[in-house]
Image (cartoon, rainbow, N blue to C red):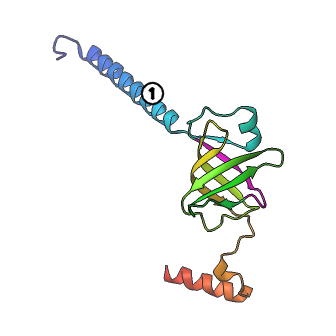
Amino acid sequence: MMGGLKAKHQRLVLVVIALVALIGAGLLAASALRNQASYFYVPTQMAEDPPAPGQAVRLGGMVQEGSLKTMSDGITITFLVGDGDVTVPVRFAGILPDLFVEGSGVVAEGKLDASGTFVADNLLAKHDENYVPRELQDMTEHQKNQVVAETEAGA
């Protein structure tokens, strides 16, 4: 292939080919990541500069007290996510995370529809640093430490 070139020139051609391949792979990876990235919005940002309908984004905020309603199908729920200033209506059909309750933090992954309702595909419930699993709520501190120690010993 490079029989007519000197060794020095052969190395130079190989380095150039390697650089072109490396740059091409980097551009391809960057393009794939850009297509997969989902932007994060809080309700105020979504109200001021909403994403294009159908664009995959994440909406984070607090589930407003008294806003959680189950639709007649028994699977779909609606609620409001707020940040203290603005609220965004959210619709979700599926199994709710265990930590999902009114007044708690939530990150909803989905798309804004043409009517301004955020249609969530996935909900991620957030808890505060004082979270205690239901199984440990009624235990004393000593009992909790025993359960944790036994769990770690068995792992």
Q: Position of residue 145 (x, y in %)?
A: 67, 84
Write down the region rendered in magenta.
57-67
The front one of 134 and 66 is 66
**Residue in the picture at 72% in, 86% down:** 138
Q: Count the marks: how many? A: 1
The front one of 138 and 121 is 121
Helix, strand or loop: magenta stretch: strand
Q: Is residue 10 above or below residue 43?
A: above
Q: Is residue 78 above or below residue 11?
A: below
Could you tell whether 82 is left or right of 109 in the image?
right
Q: Position of residue 30 (x, y in %)?
A: 48, 32
Q: Dot 1 corresponds to which residue?
A: 27
Q: Position of residue 72 (x, y in %)?
A: 60, 61
Q: Is residue 64 magenta?
A: yes
Q: Position of residue 10 (x, y in %)?
A: 26, 17
Q: Secondary structure at mark 1?
A: helix
**For the residue carrying disc 1, how many other residues have a C-alpha within 10 Å: few (<14), some (14-19), or many (20+)?**
few
**Residue in the picture at 50% in, 39% down:** 36
**Residue in the picture at 19% in, 16% down:** 2
Q: Is residue 134 above or below residue 124?
A: below
Q: Amino acid at mark 1?
A: Leu
Q: Is residue 37 magenta?
A: no
**Residue in the picture at 76% in, 33% down:** 48
Where residue 78 sits, quadrant-wise, is bottom right
Q: Quadrant of the N terminus?
A: top left
Could you tell whether 105 is left or right of 151 in the image?
right
Query: Which residue is the extreme one toward the top?
Result: 4
Where residue 99 sits, quadrant-wise, is bottom right
Query: Which residue is the extreme one toward the right?
Result: 85
Could you tell whether 5 is left or right of 34 in the image?
left
